[in-house]
Amino acid sequence: QVQLVESGGGLVQAGGSLRLSCAASGSIFSINRMGWYRQAPGKQCDLVAKITSGGTTIYADSVKGRFTISRDNAKSMSLQMNSLKPEDTAVYYCNAEIFRGIISGFDGYWGQGTQVTVSS
């Protein structure tokens, strides 16, 4: 079994900072890419940022210059969120493309989500 566990969400005032973390555990051979998505009430789930095993990063235009994604080690990553805005309020989900071996191959996994609320 594979599990992704997020931590670090919470309530912060506009202009503040939060750091989200995601750790993978279980039967994992390697992790290709990891990313963060978010879903605000009544809206679709959108990409926030993603990072490959080689360190290549991609950010949504709305968070460029404010958020930084990083790989802490082979099985975990973080999202440093600075200059937070009320429109950043959402449930943030960790996603990972995990290789579980030659037989199982690659598969995508999601965390349970962590709430980020930015007050104005």
Image (cartoon, rainbow, N blue to C red):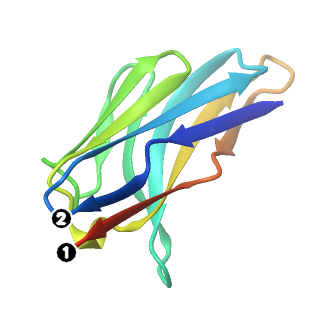
Which amino acid type corresponds to the residue marked 1 in the rendered image? Ser
C-alpha distance separating marks 1 and 2? 5 Å
Q: As displayed, is residue 53 above or below residue 6?
A: above
The residue at the point 76 percent across, 31 percent down is 2
Circle 1 sits on which residue?
120
Q: As displayed, is residue 100 above or below residue 38?
A: above
Circle 2 sits on which residue?
14
State left or right for residue 78 relative to residue 105: left
The residue at the point 51 percent across, 41 percent down is 7
State left or right for residue 8 relative to residue 60: right
The residue at the point 34 percent across, 23 percent down is 55
Figure quadrant of residue 31: top right
Q: As displayed, is residue 107 above or below residue 104?
A: below
- Dot 2 falls on a residue whose secondary structure is loop
Figure quadrant of residue 95: top right
Figure quadrant of residue 117: bottom left
Which amino acid type corresponds to the residue marked 2 in the rendered image? Ala
CB atoms at circles 1 and 2 under 8 Å apart? yes
The residue at the point 32 percent across, 29 percent down is 56
Whole-percent x and y of residue 30?
63, 17
Q: Nearer the viewer, residue 80 or 13?
A: 13
Spot the residue most to the bottom: 42
Whole-percent x and y of residue 67?
23, 45
Q: Nearer the viewer, residue 7 or 94?
A: 7
Name the quadrant of the N terminus: top right
Whole-percent x and y of residue 17?
22, 48
Q: Nearer the viewer, residue 5 or 106?
A: 5
Whole-percent x and y of residue 113?
57, 54
Name the quadrant of the C terminus: bottom left
